[in-house]
Image (cartoon, grey):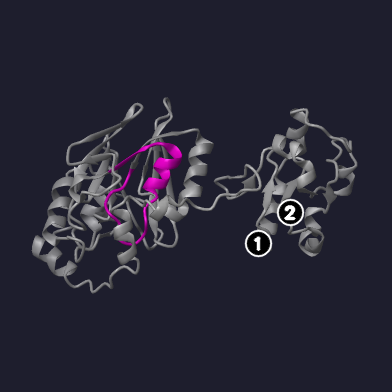
Amino acid sequence: MIFRQLFDPVSSTYTYLLGCDESRDAVVIDPVFEQHARDAALIRELGLNIRYVLDTHVHADHVTSAWLMKTAEHGEIVLSKRYGAEEVDLAVDHGDMLVFGNCSLEVRATPGHTAGCVTYVTNDRTMAFTGDCLMIRGTGRTDFQGGDVHDMWKSIREQLFTLPDDCHIYPGHDYFGRTVSTVAEEKRFNPRIGGDAQEEDFVGYMQNLGLPHPKLLDIAVPANLHCGRPENDSLPEAVTWGPVTVTFAGVPEVRPDWVARNIDDVFILDVRNEAEFDGELGHLEGSKLIPLDELRDRLDEVPKDRPVVAVCQSGKRSAMATEILLKAGYDQVANVPGGLIQWSRLALPFRDR
């Protein structure tokens, strides 16, 4: 099974991407609104088809990108039926199964943090995506949004600690950079509910956390009860000057055939050295040579009033050039993937060759 763990540094949220190797069907768990472009780039690069977009619960610290993901990738939105949320395509409850290709996830109701929290467990019981129920050496809070400390105790003890000891625990958050635990580890070392802890110990611990409410509570909860659908269905602002896509590495790219057709409307920045510029591959018509090593000192030679398209031999140095330009305040920038090697392979015109 394809598996990726992604992180949002602002909310310390983990997003998970799981896919079937054979069918390429996939699911996304707990996606973050501001990270949608990143997640969509990874899905595109891995060639996956999103079957379901899952949230473990209605979040209070970030807005989900479930609606954006459905709009872009056509997956069905999945959330616990206990919320009665709008925009949900599949309202699930304890015992339901979600199939994607040759893989599946079991839905386990694990209330406590909120009344509708669920955990998703892989069919081979080797991975559990616990949201804000059981965390790494911790648990979710139980003091707002319908939370209940006794429900949390029961959820962890009866639904999660009954999984195999070697089942990996993947939480919804971690604030210390920890990525994964196991059932056995949490049974033994979790300071709130592990070891010889009794229910009254857990209750006493949780009732004295003294945590402030999440800063985004009043924004996130109403938005997430609509699965992150923005007002007026407004989508993130798209690039309009060309068919630009952003890679999972964060590099904006534009297709070489589009550049060939629109070469008079863009500024072609060639970041190779002079020998390469006049060498075997040649160079594109009207292109400006500024070697990458000199670019930071010659930014005044790069215009800001029209799109800048960076090229090099293979698309690697020009990717670095786009990063330099973006950091310098250029907002219409893209790399040509594959560089002039790919340009030549596609038999696109070299009119200055």
Task: Relative to 153, say whether 90 is above or below.
Answer: above
Asked where in the image residue 75 lies, by quadrant, the reply is top left
Image spot of residue 216 (x, y percent): 35, 66
- The answer to whether residue 197 is visible is no
Q: Which mark identifies residue 313?
A: none
Q: Which residue matches tag 2? A: 306
Disc 2 and disc 1: Cα gap in Å?
A: 17 Å
Image spot of residue 328 (x, y percent): 69, 63
Q: Residue placed at 20% from the left, 43% from the top? A: 108
Picture quarter with the C terminus: top right
Three-letter code for the amino acid on which mark 2 is drawn: Arg
Q: Nearer the viewer, residue 250 or 221?
A: 221
- Packing grade of label 2 (10 A; few <14, some 14-19, many >=20) is some
Picture quarter with the N terminus: top left
**The magenta segment:** 54-78
Q: Residue placed at 25% from the left, 49% from the top? A: 85
Task: Relative to 19, say whether 249 is above or below.
Answer: below
- The answer to whether residue 85 is visible is yes
Query: Is residue 69 rendered magenta in the image?
Result: yes
Query: Is residue 13 rendered magenta in the image?
Result: no
Q: Residue placed at 76% from the left, 62% from the top? A: 296
Q: Which comes sooner in the sequence, label 2 or label 1?
A: 2
Image spot of residue 195 (x, y percent): 17, 58
Residue 137 placement, left or right of 146: right
Q: Which residue matches tag 1? A: 327
- Packing grade of label 1 (10 A; few <14, some 14-19, many >=20) is few
Identify the element where label 2 is drawn: loop
Q: Residue placed at 10% from the left, 61% from the top? A: 199
Three-letter code for the amino acid on which mark 1 is drawn: Lys
